[in-house]
Image (spheres, rainbow, N blue to C red):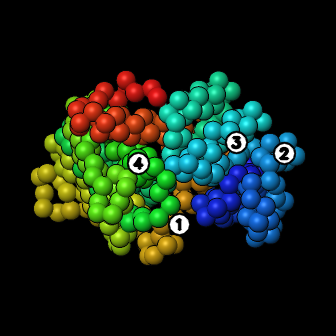
Amino acid sequence: MQRVCVIGMGHIGHNHARAYKSCEQAELVGVCDIRKDRARAAGEKFGVPYFLDAREMLEALKPDICSVATGGYEYSSDHYEPTMQAFEAGCHVLGEKPISNILKEGIEMVQRAEDLNLCYGIDLNHRFTPAARQAKLWMDEGKIGELLFCNMALWIGRYSGIDSLYYHLKCLNPHSANIMQYYCGPVDEVSCFALKATGRDFYSTASLNMKFECGAVGHLTSSYDIKRGHPMERCEVAGTEGRFVFEDMWREATLYPADSWVKEVYTNPVFGGFEGFYDTFQDRIHSFVRQVDEGCKPQDIDGSGREGLEATRLIHAAIRSIEEGGIPIKVASVTE
């Protein structure tokens, strides 16, 4: 049984706490937020002690796992300090995405976890679904063949709370970047063009072209200018033997074999409304707890800190491309 604490008790932190409460291998023992009203309300809701200081909570409760669901500038500037505090307290950490809005800090967090041999995961929850895993299984079974291309689109209308020019790319696109890297591997080069829709003062819709290290090509279109609706996400991966498409992150995956008109469909039995989306949090969080509880090696964590770092590195390379007129940028060259 893993003793767990959550730092940051906004909406997402509540999702983490709720998922831990329903996990057989976890015991939620404490919550923390710098805002007393939120900390107290969360403590009362989940029936655990609440704290206003993360270090104090870590010293008092000595958890095995700590979720870091703080926000801050670009929804990630407050990740670094509590994550490093949790590592120093000997905790395995599940952090929110993006890993950090400052790439250098993300690199330091990943390195610190590796130095201390601690498990570090990122809540890349869009990928943690039965549909996404079924698609990966089709690939592992050879039903896609040699990879050719990956096309992805994601749209979530957001019209308030934007605090920077690149908020949309940094905060939304780590999900899509990770999904594409999950299926096709590391990205070698990326070029990006973006626009500011009418009335916007930040880049709200973006188009990224990619060349993967494996030789395949890819494209990502993402937007904060379209109401969320249903569906809100689409990924297509094609190879010499077939292609698959999955709609939304939790709903459905379809395989189209190259040599047959008979398609194969997986449909998640739970996909309606918010509960379908919440399932992605529960799946991801339970997966992390299960791996830690089973003694998984840090380098084998699914959705690891390093994977989160590489998704963010890709986004920072895309931002550099925007700043340089859309020219291709070598992803590995971006270190800050």
Mark 1 vs mark 4: which is more N-terminal?
4
Residue 132 falls in image quadrant: bottom left
Disc 1 packing (10 Å; few <14; some 14–19; many ≥20): some
State the separation of the CA atoms marked 1 and 4: 29 Å
Give the number of the mark in front: 2 or 4.
Answer: 4
Which residue has dot 2 on it? 56
Q: Are marks 3 and 2 in contact (CB under 8 Å)?
A: no
Q: Are marks 3 and 1 in contact (CB under 8 Å)?
A: no
Question: Residue 180: where, in percent of width, then height?
Answer: 34, 45
- Against 217, is 213 above or below? above
Mark 3 vs mark 4: which is more N-terminal?
3
119 or 178: nearer the viewer: 178
Q: Is residue 25 left or right of residue 209?
A: right
Q: Determine the secondary structure under disc 2.
A: helix
Question: Residue 110: where, in percent of width, then height?
Answer: 57, 31
318 or 24: nearer the viewer: 318
Q: Are marks 2 and 4 in contact (CB under 8 Å)?
A: no
